[in-house]
Structures are given as C-alpha cells and as structure tokens.
C-alpha cells in the first residue's frame, strides 16, 4: 500500500504539475521587425490548440497570430484522475488494514471488494498509461520548435532567419509515463496477494484435496476389509479342527471336487 501511495503521487505530480515552454527566434531582413525571443508556454492539461502566440511577419509591423496544434487533455486528465483515485483508495485501504482488520475480514466482504477494486485499477492504469504515452508523443511533436517554425509565414522566406532557441524539457512527463506503467505492474502484482485474502484460494485447495481424502479413506477401508477377511479366514481355520473333532472326514471336499 505504501508503494501504491508513493507511485500514485509521483504519477499525478509529474504529469498534473507540469508546465513548460519553448523559445523561437525570427530574424527579419529589416531588423526592426525581428523578434529574437518568442516564448510559448504550455502546461497540463495540454489543450495546445488554445495556446496562442504572436510572431512577426517580416512585412512591416504586422504580426501573425498562431496557435499550437493538438489537444491531449483527455488522455492527460484521465491519467491524472486514475492516479488521484488510486492514491485515495490506497490511503483508505491502508487505514482499514491497520485499524479495522477484524471488520475487513468479516463475512469476507472486505477482501472481495479489495480484489475487485485491485483488478479494476490494474486495468485503468494500463489503459491510462497507454493513452497518456500516446498523448505525450503528440505533445512532443506539437511543441517541437522545428515543427512550430513551419507554421510561421515569415520562415517561408529564405531571406529571414528562423531558429529554435530552446525546446521544452519533457523529463518529468517521461517520468510520469514510466510511473504509470510501474503502477500497473504494482497493482497487477497485488491481484494474487489480494486473491489469497478472499479465501477462494484456500477453498480451491480444499476442493482439490477432497478427492484425495476420499481415495485415502477408501484405501483404508479396503485394508480393513482385507484384515477382516484374513481374520474370518483364521476363524474358518479355527472351525476346521473342531469339525474334525466331531468326526467329519477332512477328505469330503476333495471327493466332492473329484465328482465334479
């Protein structure tokens, strides 16, 4: 649970708390029209199509108003939402484990709910992390200064010099994707441990052991019958001599078999 808490915090903090930017430079033939420091800032939830900026056209004082392309808000917000709820559930589960252990195990309801929620969160982490990995890839393309320069009309003129001064730092966003998949591995790995808490595991083992127990009982009964049969044989042997004492001929059974 502690690992789940930490990993969830890292996931939503590195994604949800992100803000970055890039810088462009447009050096016009007429230097008075140039802008060598065009800053474009963007942040979570990465609705890039709403990020607008102005650049020189290098045609007098007229300026061109542009916007970045793309919208990765749905995948980013879904990822952060999963991380926040996973954190809250892990926190609640930790409190229950520590302070309400008996209530948790009562009627097997606690382990059962825990198992279902763990399976659901494992699935959500996988889907959310995969979606955000694709979303981040789109963000990287849309905020690459070289790609943004292609939107500028001034840069289509060879006489003007357009440069990418610096790119956005994406290390924390890369980290968020890594922690997303680590959370999936962590939650998926917990499925087995929570499953054992439900008691289904032990009841399954009992079910498998029942036929073995029946087999061993029937084997023991067979051994008992053999013993009783042996004892009855011994009883017959004891009767034999007593019949001889009463004068019966021991050759009777032999003569009977000869007649057959």
Image (cartoon, helix red, strand yellow):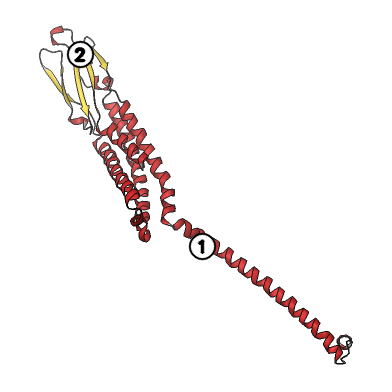
**Location of residue 193 with respect to 76 vertically, above or below:** below
The residue shown at (58%, 65%) is 213
In the picture, measured across the screen, residue 153 lies left or right of residue 194, that is: left
Q: Quadrant of the C terminus?
A: bottom right
Mark nearest the camera among 1 and 2 is 1
**Location of residue 2 with respect to 119 vertically, above or below:** above
Q: What residue is shown with label 2?
A: 26
The residue shown at (44%, 53%) is 196
Nearest to the observer: residue 251 or residue 23: 251
Question: Which secondary structure lies at badge 1?
Answer: helix
Nearest to the observer: residue 100 or residue 253: 100
Quarter of the rendering containing residue 65: top left
Label annotation for residue 195: none
Q: Quadrant of the N terminus?
A: top left
Quarter of the rendering containing residue 43: top left
Q: What residue is shown with label 1?
A: 207
Nearest to the observer: residue 49 or residue 131: 131
Residue 189 image point, x, y percent: 42, 44
**Location of residue 81 with respect to 194 vertically, above or below:** above
Question: Which secondary structure lies at badge 2?
Answer: strand
Residue 226 image point, x, y percent: 71, 73
């Amino acid at each position: 649970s502690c690992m789940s808490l930490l990993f969830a915090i890292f996931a939503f903090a590195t994604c949800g708390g992100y803000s970055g930017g890039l810088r462009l430079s447009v050096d016009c033939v007429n230097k008075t029209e140039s802008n060598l420091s065009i800053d474009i800032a963007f942040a979570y939830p990465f609705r890039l199509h709403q990020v607008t900026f102005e650049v020189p056209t290098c045609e007098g004082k007229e300026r061109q108003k542009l916007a970045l392309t793309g919208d990765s808000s749905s995948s980013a917000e879904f990822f952060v939402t999963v991380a926040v709820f996973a954190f809250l559930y892990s926190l609640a589960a930790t409190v229950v484990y520590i302070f309400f252990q008996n209530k948790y195990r009562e009627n097997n309801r606690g382990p059962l709910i825990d198992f279902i929620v763990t399976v659901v969160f494992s699935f959500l982490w996988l889907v959310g992390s995969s979606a955000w990995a694709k979303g981040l890839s789109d963000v990287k393309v849309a905020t690459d200064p070289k790609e943004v320069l292609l939107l500028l009309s001034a840069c289509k003129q060879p006489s003007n010099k357009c440069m990418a001064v610096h790119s956005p730092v994406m290390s924390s966003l890369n980290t968020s994707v890594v922690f997303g998949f680590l959370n999936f591995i962590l939650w998926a790995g917990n499925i087995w441990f929570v499953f054992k808490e439900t008691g289904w595991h032990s009841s399954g083992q009992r079910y498998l052991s029942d036929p073995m127990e029946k087999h061993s009982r029937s084997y023991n009964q067979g051994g008992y019958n053999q013993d009783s049969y042996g004892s009855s044989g011994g009883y017959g042997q004891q009767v034999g001599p007593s019949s001889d004492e009463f004068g019966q001929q021991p050759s009777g059974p032999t003569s009977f078999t000869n007649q057959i």
